[in-house]
Image (cartoon, rainbow, N blue to C red):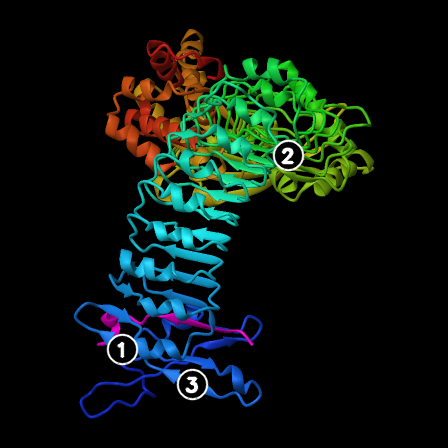
Amino acid sequence: MGVAICLHYAVKKYQNRETKENDQGPESGQVDKEISPAENDHESTFLFHPEQYKDHVDVEHIKLTKNDPVHESGQVDKEISPAENDHESTFLFHQEQYKDHVDVEHIQLTKQPEEDQSLTIFEEINQFKRLKTVTIIGLKLDDTSLSNLFQCTSIRSLKISNCQLASIPRSLANLKDLEILDLSRNNLTTLPARPIRSLPCLKSLNISHNKITVIRDVVKKLQALQHLDVSYNAVGEIPYEILEMENLEFFSCSHNKIARWLDPSNGERKASTCHLASLNMSSNLLAEVPQNVKELKNLSVVNLSDNKIGENIPDKILRQQISELFYLPSVSTNNELEDLPLVLCFLPSLTKLDLKQNKISSVSENVKSCKSLSVLDVSHNRLKEIPSQVIRLPELRVIDASNNQISSVSSLRKDESSVVEDVALADNCLSHFPEALIQTKSLKKVDLSNNNIKEIPETIMDMPKDVKLELKGNPIIDPPLEVCQAGLETIQAFYEDLTTASSITQCLKTLFLGTYEAGKTSLVRVFQLDRSNLTKTGERTDGIEVAELHLSAPNTSDITLSVWDFAGQETYYITHQFFLSAKALMLLVVNLEEYDSARFYSTCGNWMENMIAKVGNPVVIPVATHIDKLEPEEVEPRIAEDFDKNLESRMPDHLLLCVAKKLGAEWERLAIHMGFTKANVYKFKCDHLYNTDQQILAMLTTWRDRKGRNATRQELQRVLIEAGVDVISCL
Ligand SMILES: Nc1nc2c(ncn2[C@@H]2O[C@H](COP(=O)(O)OP(=O)(O)OP(=O)(O)O)[C@@H](O)[C@H]2O)c(=O)[nH]1
């Protein structure tokens, strides 16, 4: 039976912690505690699980226990207590103790990361003839200890991580059977090329999280290597020799400073026999897709995200490799792209393309060559429409085009052969429900949330019933919002009822709002009596008066108005908001005789703002009263010049969001032009990390708040023009 020991080092810092209730200490107050590592039967390995470790941080003595191989059935346990050298904070194996452990196969020494402890390994470790796996994490090791360890030539897997290593002794080359070497999270600036290249069996090399700048000397001769991780270093170039590593399947060089993948030094490019399947070059300084990528015929995943790849790259590559198409099912980019990279368009096996958070505003015709594309993510870009050439891709099932500037979808495929199932168009500028979606019978999920859609057309009856339709965040008025919020089935049932019901009773909640003695009650009476019947002076409405009013008109069904006449005294204002609702019609009654510009906010503006705050996009009809007291020529100017203009100039959030979506990088310039400081801009960015639309919206709403009643559409238009930003079309 193979025997293994796993030791977790208990750190001294915790010795003075409160002891547990069931522990019993000697008189001196010192508490002796013993812990027995759990046994992993399958691997014959004793393991402290990380969770268990937490329960034992205050132990003072650690026992290493192993099963005696001679007494397999009798389960005789032996225990040893390694001594502890307090002064040097060094954990020591005493020479005598080695003798009891020479048959272990696995050693694992792990310590709490915040402790600065070192480990001394004595020469006698070379008596561990069966040692296969050594894992040392978080303990400082000197060269002598390392050299001693490297005498154990039976080791196959060696992990020395987070041990502050600055160099590796040459004796590493002794480990001729070594298959796995993990030197991650150390302080290595160079790699000991010679000893590593002398490891003929090495299959996996992890040197991530170091400070290494050059890897060429190391990778050159590692022909058995299958897995190479050099991520989180300071490497500047990928050596050409990677392509000559026949067995390499996984290569990650993410988070380095890589700007290029070198060509062969002798200029002779041979056909690569590299079997690389996964290549991660994310978070580097690549300005183009490296030419050498085309040599990798077995690539299944490539990650190019967070580089500096712009639009001009792929043409050059494309022409050379168009006949050498390679399998590339998943591409991830988060770059500076302004169009779909052509090289990607000519990959007939490409199934998934992730281009989110770029600057793509158009997609070239060539995308139609991506015949296998099934999932396309172009969210957080600058698209104004879903390009028809994308929609026509025969295998396309999922499109995520959310967070763009899409204002219409006119090009979805309507024919029966469409396989598009999932369309995400949330956070765009759609003002109409896209009819094309209704005709796409393959759809299963559509997300249109946070657009500017006001109506759902009756043709939605044709949409397959099982489509999961998301409409939240739209200012919908027809059908009523409550119906739309309940989902597609309810919307369809609503229209079904409208078409099939023999008699339809329509009831409309109508709210009469306005200031004190504006003429609300008198207006209600006009509807009720069909003639003027002014209230008498001093006849006041208390609270709310509710009445029903039946209206009929030729060629249309009767309608019942549920009339809510609100008292205009200020004391009642606070209660009004509870009765405002999106599906109600609101009549805002204004005494035009007493109206002038200075009174706009008290008579109209504040009411509008309350309504907008409560229901988002209210349906309001302003009604002017007392006009009989004005000369006819006085009426029109007041309404047109002032009243209308002011009402029209209100800027609700959804309008500002539309502007935000249309703005690009120029928003920062606009912000400065609007009087914000660089620090303000920085804060908008920090408050809404990774969401440019929200950063801009925050800036615009802050501008609106600062400007108060002067924050009109006209003013915003003026500022936009002055700043040279061409987005005023949406205002
Ligand atoms: N000349 C004229 N007088 C009006 C008109 N509308 C209302 N009045 C008068 O204005 C006064 C207030 O009218 P109401 O209809 O009671 O006003 P209200 O908005 O309901 O008032 P509160 O209930 O106090 O909020 C009454 O004396 C009405 O006769 C109008 O169009 N022309």
Point out which mark residue 451 bears. none
Identify whether 587 is placed above or below 98. Answer: above
Q: Amino acid at mark 2?
A: Asn
Q: Amino acid at mark 1?
A: Ala
The mark that comes first in sequence, 3 or 2, is: 3
- The quadrant of the rendering that contains the N terminus is bottom right
- Image coords of residue 166 (percent x, y): 28, 48
Determine if the C-beta at disc 1 is less than 8 A from ligand 1.
no
Instruction: Give the residue at x 62% y 18%.
Output: 321
Give the quarter of the image for residue 409: top right
Q: Which residue is mark 1?
A: 83
Q: Marks 1 and 2: CB-CB under 8 Å?
A: no
What is the spatial separation of the Cα atoms under label 1 and label 2, in whole angstroms?
53 Å
Q: Secondary structure at mark 2?
A: loop
Q: Earlier in the sequence, mark 1 or mark 2?
A: 1
- Asked whether, in this view, residue 90 is left or right of residue 538, the answer is left
According to the picture, the residue beneath numbered tag 3 turns out to be 78
Q: Which residue is mark 2?
A: 298
Looking at the image, which residue is at 71% across and 35% down?
421
Mark 3 or mark 1: name the one nearer the start of the chain: 3
- As drawn, 109 above or below 270: below
Q: Nearer the viewer, residue 194 or 608?
A: 194
Q: Nearer the viewer, residue 539 or 411?
A: 411
Q: Is mark 2 within 8 Å of ligand 1?
A: no
Residue range of the region highlighted in magenta in the rendering = 1-16
**Disc 1 secondary structure class:** loop
* Label 1 neighbour load within 10 Å: few <14, some 14-19, many 20+: some
Residue shown at the point (69%, 25%) measured from the top left: 348
Q: List x then y, in percent, for residue 291.
A: 53, 22
Mark 3 neighbour class, 10 Å CA radius: few under 14, some 14 to 19, many 20 or more: few
Q: Is residue 691 magenta?
A: no
